[in-house]
Image (cartoon, rainbow, N blue to C red):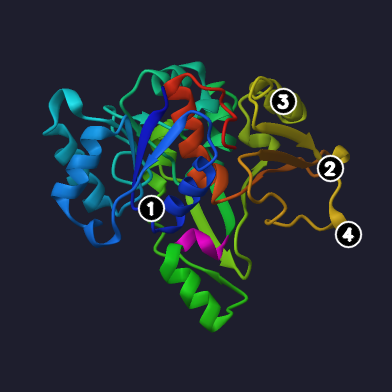
Amino acid sequence: MKKKIFIDGEEGTTGLQIYERLENHPYIELLKIKSKNRKSLSAKKILMKEADLVFLCLPDVASIETVALGKELKEHCPIFIDASTAHRTSREWSYGLPELSNEYRNKIKNSNKIAIPGCYASGANLLIYPLTNKGLILNSHQFIVQAVSGYSGGGKKLIEYQKNSNTPFFYYGLDLNHKHLPEIKFHSNLEKDPIFLPSVANFYQGMIVNIFLNKDDFVKEASFFEIQDIFRNFYKDQQFIVSKFHKSIEFSNGFYKPNLIINSNNVEINIFKNDKKQQLIISVNFDNLGKGASGAAIQCMNLRFGFDEKLGL
């Protein structure tokens, strides 16, 4: 029997992508809400009662309200997968980045409340977690994270703005208080927020997240020279992640572009190192609308229902 799925916020960027990806999923039946009823709590409640799982593609406040509405259904309350920032550091919710550890993966498989990471946080945690979890770099280290994303990451408002302004590039989050920082600090077990500089460029989708290190940042000097093996071994069993070392990385015209991976849930971790200068850039390249949003949501749904992790992706 197919699982019934309701996407609350289907008309938004993430919701629309989830809908399009699930249309041909062999084990899913999509429940539709009439356009005029999108904000009707009673209409949503009827669909939630029928659904096995609800994707929440809503602002934080609306997401919290919808979860509370679902609780009123008691034994008929569906599984929630939330794409907002509302529950990403809650211990009552599983965090939808199964590649971090078997503990994260197993919690997703057995959870009725799954929070999908923010796109920047996905990248930062995939880079930082292996370093702190394995004790290679101290949790007290001041990480510096720089990122660039396509303008679709800002949703409908930024998409419309960019179409009208055609701005080539801009930084933002210059108050050093970006909304993804709490989940990076929490899930990578850091003592302090990273210094984070996000940016948006004039392309629709795709992104790169970078961290910068030197040999002295490592607890053991050898870790600097073994970094490519460390990342390769950490993610060797993950279907969507591949790690590459700079000597084996080939880019078109020699340029590393943030829109190399689009319409995909795949992730490339690229390691650039200068042994003589003892400097290192660890970078992750992926689709902000894929692994950074809708792809991650569907991956978590597949895990929760025991489907093949790649179905619909």
Closer to the camera, 42 or 138? 42
Q: Nearer the viewer, mark 4 or mark 1?
A: 1
Q: Residue at x 77, y 29 (%)?
A: 225
For marks 2 and 1, give the CA distance. 38 Å
User: Which region shows up in magenta?
Assistant: 150-154
Does label 4 or label 1 sit earlier along the sequence?
Answer: 1
Look at mark 1 in the image and give the residue it sits on: 10
**Residue occupied by mark 3:** 232
Q: Between label 4 and label 3, give the one nearer the viewer.
A: 4
3 or 2: tag closer to the N-terminus: 3
Q: Residue furthest front?
A: 1
Residue 235 picture location, percent across and down: 65, 25
Amino acid bearing label 3: Arg
Identify the secondary structure beneath mark 1. loop
Residue 285 locus on image (x, y percent): 66, 46
**Rounded to the nearest whole Å, what is the CA distance between mark 4 and mark 3?**
26 Å
Residue at which label 2 appears: 249
Q: Is residue 288 left or right of residue 191?
A: right
Q: Is residue 134 above or below residue 224?
A: above
The amino acid type found where label 1 is placed reads Glu
